[in-house]
Amino acid sequence: MSNNISFEGLPKKFSGKKSELTAKAWNSKFRRVVRIQGLEDSTAIDVFKIWLEGEAEEWMDKKESSNKDSVVAKISEWMNALEIKFPSTKKEELVKLQSTRSIEEMHLGSKETVREFNQRFRESLDKIDPDFYTKQMIKVIYGNLMRSIDTAVAWSMLDNDEYDTWGYEKVMTEFIKTKDRREGFSE
């Protein structure tokens, strides 16, 4: 990786004001420049953060300090969060995603709680067109994420005789309860 970072080609700093580019359009241009420059995720995240100003910068600062996780592993997660925080008001921009990839690739941040993760999961799910998934698919996706977060808790839940009858919301709630109980015993 080169130590020389060029800011050439980047869109104007994003502030979240309605008169500017939408977060989606800004992200699209930012993503292209990052790809062309060959920036690694960690560098792209740093550039992303310094390319926010005003309300958007305040949001980013608050997100970092509330999660105590300033090192989110993927630039795509920051971009997704930006689009959730600053949704487009233009009707044509309100088109839902046509893939579950954004939730399939999620992971728990190093200082993020499962409750915060679940909230982020729900926000990301809300951006996906419901015609492109079933509730059972979401349950399977969340189950895979659960196993990556805490294998022991996930398997103990899968052993529950009622697991097959639960919807994904129930699985999310039970995962928090079971994880909290286990962590309470381990302290």
Image (tube, rainbow, N blue to C red):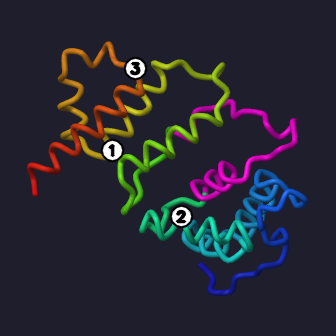
Image location (x, y in percent) of residue 89: 83, 44
Q: Earlier in the sequence, mark 3 or mark 2?
A: 2
Identify which amino acid the numbered label 2 is placed on.
Lys
Q: Secondary structure at mark 1?
A: helix
Nearer mark to the viewer, of 1 and 2: 2
In the rendered image, the vertical position of residue 9 relative to residue 186, given as above or below = below
Circle number at residue 148 = 1
Q: Which residue is mark 3?
A: 167
**Above-or-below relation of 173 to 68:** above
Question: Which residue corresponds to the image point at 69% horizontal and 30% vertical from the top-left?
Answer: 98
Residue displayed at 81% across by 60% down: 29
Q: Is residue 123 magenta?
A: no
The tag earlier along the polypeptide, 1 or 2, is 2
Element at label 2: helix
Q: Which residues are magenta?
A: 76-103
Return the residue nearer the eye: 9 or 70: 70
Q: Residue 88 in magenta? A: yes
Mark in the foreground, 3 or 1: 3
Q: Are marks 1 and 2 in contact (CB under 8 Å)?
A: no
Separation of disc 3 and disc 1 at Cα? Answer: 19 Å
Inspect the image, locate mark 1, and give the three-letter code of the amino acid beneath it.
Ser
Q: Is residue 104 left or right of residue 114?
A: right
Classify mark 3: helix, strand or loop: loop
Relative side of 92 to 42, left or right: right
Mark 3: amino acid: Gly
Point out the residue furthest to the top here: 165
Secondary structure predominantly adopted by residues drawn in magenta: helix
Numbered tag placed on residue 63 in the rendering: 2
Residue for point 55% across, 68% down: 62
Q: Nearer the viewer, residue 7 or 72?
A: 72
